[in-house]
């Protein structure tokens, strides 16, 4: 599994979003991209993170950012989540976990003392050249936009 670091070329992302539109990282070259990986649609932390990005979407767009959210949920789940919270950005389902593995976000987690494997909440900022400019391993779900903007 990948152990990506700042300066690495971001692995390719291609897939259909929650509306069936094709999304690719390559088509966003020349723009900054926030790629955020999250465990599951409609859970408290994932909802807080998505809504924080939604609430600051125009400000992020004005600063030149595109946003892509990725989890292992299916297209139907992403569509329902997106519609329920009026999310204006692409959510890509990765049931096969190819993108998740390419970015190295799958791993051990702990909940209530039990260990299991799953998606670790992480965000990657990709620069205009397609290289990783920043990696967030400790995401502040309620203040993620401020966390991103402060780091740049």
Image (cartoon, rainbow, N blue to C red):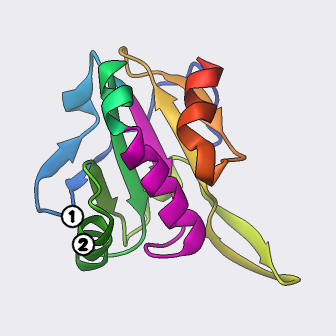
Write down the residue under mark 2.
75
Residue 126: which quarter of the image? top left
Q: Residues within 10 Å of mark 1 (few under 14, many from 20)?
A: many
Check the picture and name the quadrant holding the C terminus: top right
Q: Residues within 10 Å of mark 2 (few under 14, many from 20)?
A: some
The answer to whether the residue labelled 2 contacts the one labelled 1, judged by CB atoms less than 8 Å apart, is: yes
Q: CA distance from mark 2 to mark 1?
A: 5 Å
Where does the image place residue 112, in percent across and percent down from the top left? 84, 84
Write down the residue under mark 1.
18
- Which residue is drawn at the image coordinates 11% and 62% (left, top)? 20
Q: Which mark is residue 146?
A: none
The verdict on residue 38 being magenta is yes
Residue 82: which quarter of the image? bottom left
- Counting residues from the N terminus, which is met first, the one under dot 2 or under dot 1? 1
Q: Is residue 80 left or right of residue 38?
A: left
- Which residue is drawn at the image coordinates 29% and 72% (left, top)? 84
Magenta span of residues: 33-56
In the structure shown, which secondary structural element does the residue marked by tag 1 occupy? loop
The verdict on residue 94 being magenta is no
Q: Is residue 113 left or right of residue 77?
A: right
- Which residue is drawn at the image coordinates 57% and 18% (left, top)? 7
Where is 125 relative to 111, above or below?
above
Task: Please state the total of marks drawn on the protein image.
Answer: 2
Where does the image place residue 24, in percent across and percent down from the top left? 23, 40
Where is 152 relative to 34, above or below?
above
Foreground pick, 135 / 53: 53
Whether residue 2 is visible: no
Where does the image place residue 91, in percent across and percent down from the top left? 31, 57
- Which residue is drawn at the image coordinates 57% and 72% (left, top)? 44
Q: Is residue 152 left or right of residue 94?
A: right
């Amino acid at each position: 599994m990948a152990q990506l670091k700042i300066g690495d070329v971001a692995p390719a992302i291609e897939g259909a979003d929650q509306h069936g539109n094709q999304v690719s990282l390559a088509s966003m070259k020349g723009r900054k991209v926030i790629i955020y990986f999250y465990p599951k649609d409609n859970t408290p932390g994932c909802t807080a993170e998505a809504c924080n990005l939604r609430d600051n979407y125009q400000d992020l767009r004005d600063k030149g950012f595109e946003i892509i959210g990725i989890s292992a949920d299916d297209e139907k789940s992403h569509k329902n989540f997106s519609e329920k919270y009026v999310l204006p950005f692409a959510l890509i389902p990765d049931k096969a976990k190819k993108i998740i593995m390419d970015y190295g976000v799958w791993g051990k987690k702990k909940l209530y003392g039990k260990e299991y494997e799953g998606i670790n909440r992480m965000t990657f900022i990709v620069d205009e050249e397609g290289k990783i400019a920043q990696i967030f391993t400790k995401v502040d779900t309620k203040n993620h936009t401020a966390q991103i903007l402060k780091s740049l």
